[in-house]
Image (spheres, rainbow, N blue to C red):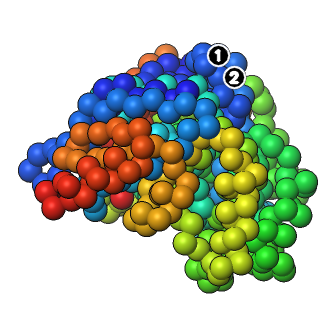
């Protein structure tokens, strides 16, 4: 990914830093600059968003945790039914955590450049870094929230520990990859059209029932199963749930499809970021 | 040396594109001090932004053979909810330099005292400018860019800026935009005039000003 970025963004100008170099940055140097800038942006973002008051940066995962916890309690109180005799708590935990992952990353990237334009006066900061820092932050928040809730729920015996950690991690990472690619695209595109800002929230609400977070593929009729799997998030979540909830159920996923889908989406996402970087004009 | 080759900048405007800078060539040597003259809207700030790397070229190229600063005392990239020290920390991080040994200098120079621990949004514009100038002096560059900045703070502060910049860093290259002819005359050794998108270089300030005044009534 970084190599793509390196080739994409360093084409017109050398991305050098103090002290100067007459030659182009090597790939390794670029990577080190990138790492430094992204981590500086991360710290800046954390302080800006959560400040030093009350629990400070702990809000990073306290916020998504509250969300998942709230929905879990609500579903239990309302005696909601989850499919295939899976416990409501386990189904909601594995469902809402994934919602937070794929929904929050793009949402934080919409309009991300506006407040950060002036950072571009520091030549080593490029729009790509701004998006990466926000994606990493949201991803970390959703992941930490999942881990803490899992430990808590398992500790109290509300949920059985995951059966296959490898599948849990693979499903989660595939979903994160999808979300990150989508974030690049949506984030960069939102600089081109303000309509994204207006429509993105309603769109995510409409996608939510289709995402696979709130249903299982197996109980659907075969035709509907095929349709459902066209949505890449469905495969990711089914794989994730297979690892978490186990072999007692039948799960359906098409991983090669997701990988191809993600690759294409990431390509368009990065292309759009590059396109946006070129067309930037500061006041 | 910094070298601008056939640099062109266009901006999208209502119903088309406007060429702000048209095939500009310029060489800036180490230690050289260049004043940019031109009317409002002639593209002076655009030129500074392009050299700084904050803005992208339409065509042509820039070669930076020495390190180039961000526009001096530029306060725009402060994050209002962060403290002065947080903003210093951010600068130190992205420029890969240590933070602890810079605090005293910034405290001293900006005269902000305990305000450095307060969010920047609580600062007055003068305080902001003092912090911005202090941060600009934390990182060393071979070439400093200035876009109308020295007129900040009171006389005493301006005096100290002069010392930091034009005495302690007198060996560095500087590219400056100012509406104050006296300022340009005092600090530059050559001048360029921007007129209708083209750049006209002059070896002496006097020639530059003569040309500028002769054409200043033209649009």
Q: Quadrant of the C terminus of chain B?
A: bottom left
Quarter location, residue A230: top left
Numbered disc 2: secondary structure? helix
| Chain of the residue under the numbered disc 2 shown in the image | A
Q: Position of residue B95 (x, y in %)?
A: 72, 42
Quarter location, residue B109: bottom right
Numbered disc 1: secondary structure? loop
Q: Position of residue B63 (x, y in %)?
A: 49, 25
Give the CA separation, mark 1 to mark 2: 5 Å
The residue beneath circle 2 is A29
Q: Position of residue B167 (x, y in %)?
A: 72, 54
The residue beneath circle 1 is A26
Which residue in the rendered view is the most extreme toward the left?
B15
Task: Determine whether B19 is above or below B26 in the image.
Answer: below
Q: Residue at x 47, y 57 (%)?
A: B184
Q: Is residue A212 left or right of residue B82?
A: left
Instruction: Tell me whether the residue at label 1 lies in contact with that at label 2, contact meaning CB atoms closer than 8 angstroms.
Output: yes
Residue A262 in view, yes or no: no
């Amino acid at each position: 990914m970084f190599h793509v970025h390196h080739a994409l963004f360093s084409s017109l100008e050398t991305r050098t830093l103090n002290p100067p170099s007459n030659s182009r940055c090597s790939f390794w140097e670029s990577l080190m600059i990138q790492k430094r800038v992204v981590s500086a942006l991360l710290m800046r973002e954390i302080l800006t968003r959560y400040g030093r008051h009350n629990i400070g940066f702990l809000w990073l995962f306290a916020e998504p945790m509250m969300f998942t916890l709230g929905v879990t309690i609500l579903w239990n109180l309302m005696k909601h039914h989850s499919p295939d005799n899976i416990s409501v708590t386990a189904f909601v935990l594995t469902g809402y955590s994934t919602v937070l992952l794929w929904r929050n990353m793009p949402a934080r990237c919409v309009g991300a450049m506006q407040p950060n334009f002036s950072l571009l006066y520091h030549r080593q900061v490029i729009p790509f870094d701004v998006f990466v820092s926000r994606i990493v932050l949201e991803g970390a928040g959703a992941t930490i929230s999942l881990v803490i809730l899992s430990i808590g729920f398992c500790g109290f015996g509300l949920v059985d520990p995951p059966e296959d950690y490898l599948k849990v991690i693979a499903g989660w990472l595939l979903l994160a990859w999808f979300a990150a690619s989508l974030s690049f695209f949506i984030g960069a595109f939102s600089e081109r059209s303000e309509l994204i800002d207006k429509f993105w929230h309603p769109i995510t609400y409409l996608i939510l029932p289709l995402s696979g977070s709130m249903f299982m593929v197996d109980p659907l009729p075969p035709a509907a199963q095929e349709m459902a799997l066209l949505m890449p998030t469905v495969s990711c979540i089914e794989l994730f749930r297979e690892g978490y909830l186990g072999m007692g159920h039948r799960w359906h996923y098409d991983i090669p499809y997701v990988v191809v889908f993600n690759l294409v989406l990431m390509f368009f996402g990065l292309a759009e970021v590059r396109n946006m970087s070129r067309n930037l004009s500061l006041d | 040396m910094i070298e601008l080759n056939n640099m062109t900048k266009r901006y999208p405007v209502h119903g088309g594109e406007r060429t702000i800078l048209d095939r500009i060539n310029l060489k800036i040597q180490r230690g050289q001090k260049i004043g940019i003259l031109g009317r409002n809207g002639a593209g002076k700030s655009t030129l500074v932004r392009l050299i700084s790397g904050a803005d992208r070229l339409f065509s042509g190229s820039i070669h930076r053979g020495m390190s180039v600063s961000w526009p001096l005392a530029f306060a725009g990239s402060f994050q209002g909810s962060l403290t002065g020290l947080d903003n210093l920390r951010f600068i130190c991080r992205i420029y890969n330099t240590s933070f602890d040994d810079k605090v005293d200098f910034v405290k001293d120079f900006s005269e902000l005292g305990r305000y450095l621990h307060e969010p920047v949004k609580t600062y007055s514009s003068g305080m902001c400018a003092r912090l911005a100038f202090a941060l600009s002096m934390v990182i060393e560059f071979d070439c400093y860019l200035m876009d109308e900045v020295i007129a900040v703070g009171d006389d005493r502060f301006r005096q100290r800026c002069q010392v930091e910049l034009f005495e302690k860093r007198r060996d560095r290259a500087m590219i400056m935009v100012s509406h104050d002819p006296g300022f340009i005359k005092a600090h530059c050794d050559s001048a360029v005039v921007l007129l209708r998108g083209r750049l006209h270089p002059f070896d002496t300030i006097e020639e530059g000003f003569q040309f500028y005044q002769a054409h200043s009534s033209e649009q």
